[in-house]
Amino acid sequence: MKIWLDGGLRDIESARVSVFDHGLTVGDGIFETVKTVDGRPFALTRHLDRLTRSARGLGLPDPDHDEIRRACAAVLEANPLPLGRLRITYTGGHGPLGSDRGEHGPTLVVALGETARRPDSTAVITVPWTRNERGALAGLKTTSYAENVVALARAHQHGASEALFANTVGQLCEGTGSNVFVVLDGEIHTPPLASGCLAGITRALTVEWTGARESDLPLDVLERADEVFLTSSLRDVQAVHGVDDRELPGTAGPVTAKAMRIFDERSGADLDP
C-alpha cells in the first residue's frame, strides 16, 4: 500500500509525519473523504473546493489543487480497488506544543482504503450533545473529530451506525459524518447550513437533484417524519429504519427510494458533477 506524503508516493510502512505536526498535537487540520469507483474519484472538484473553504476558515494557506489531483491519481494508480475511501488530509504542519502555528508550512497526506457498499437502510440514535452553530469550526471539515468519535461509539453501543445532533437551539443539525433528510407529507426537507451542519457534497447534490427544501426543523421532527434518510460520500443516499426506539419500515419508503434511484443514476452518469 502506498500513500502520498508531502510531494511524493511513500510506502505506508515507511511514511512518517512529525510528532510535532499541528494536526496531531492540536487538531489543526482539515480533510476530505472521497468515494472512488474502479480507481476514479467521485465529485473531486466539489471536494477540493470545500477543502479550500475549510482551509480559509482555519487560516491555512490555500491547498494546491493541481498537486492534490496529481496525488490522488498517483495513489489510485498504485492501489487499484473496486470501491475505495480516498482520504485527503491537510494540516498546519510542524509546529510548537501549543496553539500557535509554526513556519514550516502545511502537511499533505493522501491515502486510500478499501470499503464496501453500505446497506440500503440503517438505524440511528440521537445524542444529548449539541453542535455549536456559532462556533469557529461550524461548517468546516476539520480533523477535530473527537466529539464525533464519542457520539459514534455511543451509536455502535446501541446497535446503530450513526448519531444525530441537534444544535444549541434544539434544531436538527447533522450526524457525526452525514447529513440528515426527513420526509413530511411527501416533501423532502434537510437542515440549512445556518444550523451548523457541514455543507455535505452528497447533501448538495441530493438537494439539487431531488428538489429537497432547506428548512429549520426541531429535533423531535424525527419522531413524526414519514421517512428519514442520510447522505454522505460513502453512504450516498441511505434509508433509516430506526431512530432511537422508533421503528420505521425496514425498506426505503417511496420518497427515499426515489431519491436513492435518482442519486444512483445521476452520479453514475457523471463522476465529477
Image (cartoon, grey):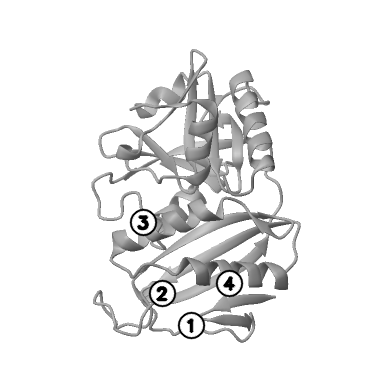
Q: Earlier in the sequence, mark 1 or mark 2?
A: 1
10 Å neighbourhood of mark 4: few (<14), some, or many (≥20)?
Answer: many
Amino acid bearing label 4: Ala
Tell me the distance, in whole angstroms, between the alpha carbons under discs 4 and 2. 21 Å
Amino acid bearing label 1: Val
User: How many labels sit on residues?
Assistant: 4
* Residue position marked by numbered label 1 in the rendering: 17
* Residue position marked by numbered label 3 in the rendering: 53
Q: Earlier in the sequence, mark 2 or mark 3?
A: 2
* Residue position marked by numbered label 2 in the rendering: 24
Q: Earlier in the sequence, mark 4 or mark 2?
A: 2
Mark 1–mark 2 CB contact (< 8 Å): yes
Residue 13 point in image, percent of width and height: 64, 83
10 Å neighbourhood of mark 3: few (<14), some, or many (≥20)?
Answer: some
Of the two numbered discs 4 and 1 in the rendering, the one whose residue sits closer to the viewer: 4
Residue 127 point in image, percent of width and height: 41, 41
Amino acid bearing label 2: Leu
Q: Residue at x 45, y 22 (%)?
A: 223
Q: Earlier in the sequence, mark 3 or mark 1?
A: 1
Tell me the distance, in whole angstroms, between the alpha carbons under discs 1 and 2. 9 Å
Of the two numbered discs 3 and 1 in the rendering, the one whose residue sits closer to the viewer: 3
Q: Residue at x 35, y 85 (%)?
A: 104
Q: Which mark is residue 71?
A: 4
Amino acid bearing label 3: Arg
